């Protein structure tokens, strides 16, 4: 990865009983320099679909544009939304088609459809894995995984998942210099796609202190 490209992050996806939770930090780096303190890393690409991005910011933004257009075209032509599995397969095909000149990214694609909450992780060459518990990407993921593996509980609800995601991100941001600044969290359920307010996240962090 070139030193003048923005990268570095921690992203988290958690499957809950009533939906999925996606969370990221907001720092982007260029080598050893902090390039942005408010980088967007979780994107809505459909009604109940979202993806988190880690790696090259330019590559990630291009993939978000492709997926947003494809899901909109699908809904217009089929008159119903694309499933999480179909969207993941589509994204995997896009990545696989460029495997010799790879998009330099790690991605999590998640959402809620008629089968319930689903979470998929994708690598730069289009490798696709469904995770029915949690996943983390980016330079801070080793620290985040430590918290997730020790504290994730099967059957937890989205409110509990939000607290766990914030706790895992806080641990990553404390040890990974490429992760930091603010925490952004999204909750996707059958009823809604919701961006969690900064005040709520601040309250959770205060309770942890």
Image (tube, rainbow, N blue to C red):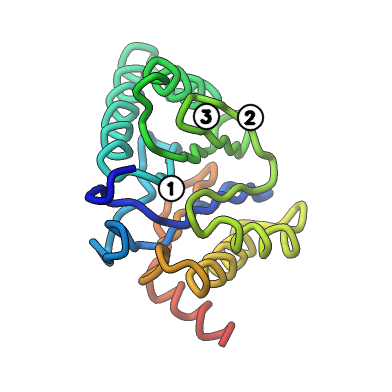
Q: Nearer the viewer, mark 3 or mark 1?
A: 3
Q: Are marks 3 and 2 in contact (CB under 8 Å)?
A: yes
Q: Which numbered tag is attached to residue 193?
A: 1
Which residue is label 2 attached to?
Answer: 115
How far apart are the alpha carbons under marks 3 and 2? 9 Å
From this view, report whether residue 119 is shown above or below residue 6. Answer: above
Q: Residues within 10 Å of mark 2 (few under 14, many from 20)?
A: few
Quarter-of-image position of residue 8: bottom left
Mark 1 vs 2, N-terminal side: 2
Image-based side of 22 in relation to 184, left or right: right
Residue at image location 47% in from the left, 57% down from the top: 10
Q: SS for tag 2?
A: loop
Which residue is label 3 attached to?
Answer: 84
- Where does the N terminus fall, quadrant-wise? top left
Residue at image location 51% in from the left, 75% down from the top: 174
Given residues 110 and 173, the one toward you in this image is 173
Q: Residues within 10 Å of mark 3 (few under 14, many from 20)?
A: many
Where is residue 114? Give x, y as percent.
Answer: 59, 29
Where is residue 15? Give x, y as percent.
Answer: 63, 47
């Amino acid at each position: 990865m070139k030193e003048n490209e923005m990268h570095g992050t921690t992203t988290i996806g958690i499957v809950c009983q009533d939906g999925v939770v996606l969370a990221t930090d907001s720092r982007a780096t260029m080598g050893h320099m902090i390039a942005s303190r408010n980088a967007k890393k979780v994107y809505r690409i459909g009604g109940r679909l979202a993806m988190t991005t880690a790696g090259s910011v330019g590559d990630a933004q291009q993939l978000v544009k492709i997926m947003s257009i494809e899901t909109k075209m699908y809904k217009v032509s089929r008159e119903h939304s694309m499933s999480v599995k179909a969207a993941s397969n589509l994204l995997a095909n896009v990545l696989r088609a460029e495997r010799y000149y790879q998009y330099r990214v790690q991605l999590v694609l998640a959402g809620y459809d008629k089968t319930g909450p689903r979470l998929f992780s994708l690598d730069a060459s289009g490798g696709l894995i469904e995770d029915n518990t949690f996943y983390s990407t980016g330079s801070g993921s080793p620290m985040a995984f430590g918290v997730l593996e020790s504290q994730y509980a099967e059957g937890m609800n989205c409110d509990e998942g939000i607290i766990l995601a914030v706790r895992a991100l806080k641990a990553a941001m404390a040890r990974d210099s490429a992760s930091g600044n603010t925490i952004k969290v999204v909750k996707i359920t059958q009823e809604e796609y919701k961006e969690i307010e900064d005040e709520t996240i601040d309250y959770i962090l205060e309770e942890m202190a």
